[in-house]
Amino acid sequence: MGRTESRSTDCRGTCDCFTMALSGQLGSAGLRADKLETTATVSCEKLEAGWTVTQSHLYVKGTAPKADAAAWEKAAEAAMSAAPFRSY
């Protein structure tokens, strides 16, 4: 597997992990998500040590009846702090 494929796999894993954590947090709050979709945007820079991921941003779209903006924010923050994400 090449470096590009490896980074792509890392991003997919991060998105999947965050989506599962968010679903769990919503469930813990008594809310059920009908749909969750997470994508990542990653920035790379060529440093002395070689190409390095310098930023990673997750974007989430979803529907959860009965969840207001505050519930989404609380669940997302809890998911971000609870999930074992890689730091870039």
Image (spheres, grey):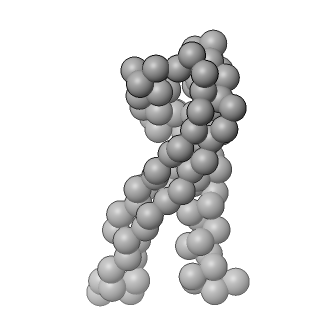
Residue 2 appears in the picture as rendered: yes
Residue for point 33% across, 80% down: 45
- Identify the image quadrant of residue 6: bottom right
Residue for point 44% across, 64% down: 41
Say above or below: 46 vs 35: below
For the residue pair 33 and 10, the one nearer the viewer reads as: 33
For the residue pair 37 and 83, the one nearer the viewer reads as: 37
For the residue pair 88 and 58, the one nearer the viewer reads as: 58
- Decide if residue 8 is on the left or right side of residue 77: right
Residue 74 appears in the picture as rendered: no
Q: Which percent across, then down, holds residue 14?
A: 57, 54
Q: Residue furthest left?
A: 48
Residue for point 56% across, 63% down: 11
Q: Which percent across, then down, holds residue 40?
A: 49, 59
Say above or below: 80 vs 28: below
Say above or below: 71 vs 83: above
Q: Quadrant of the C terminus?
A: bottom left
- Decide if residue 26 is on the left or right side of residue 55: right
Residue for point 49% across, 55% down: 86
- Decide if residue 87 is on the left or right side of residue 10: left
- Decide if residue 38 is on the left or right side of residue 52: right
Q: Which percent across, then down, holds residue 35?
A: 66, 38
- How many numbered dots are placed on residues in this image? 0
Q: Quadrant of the N terminus?
A: bottom right
Q: Residue furthest top?
A: 30
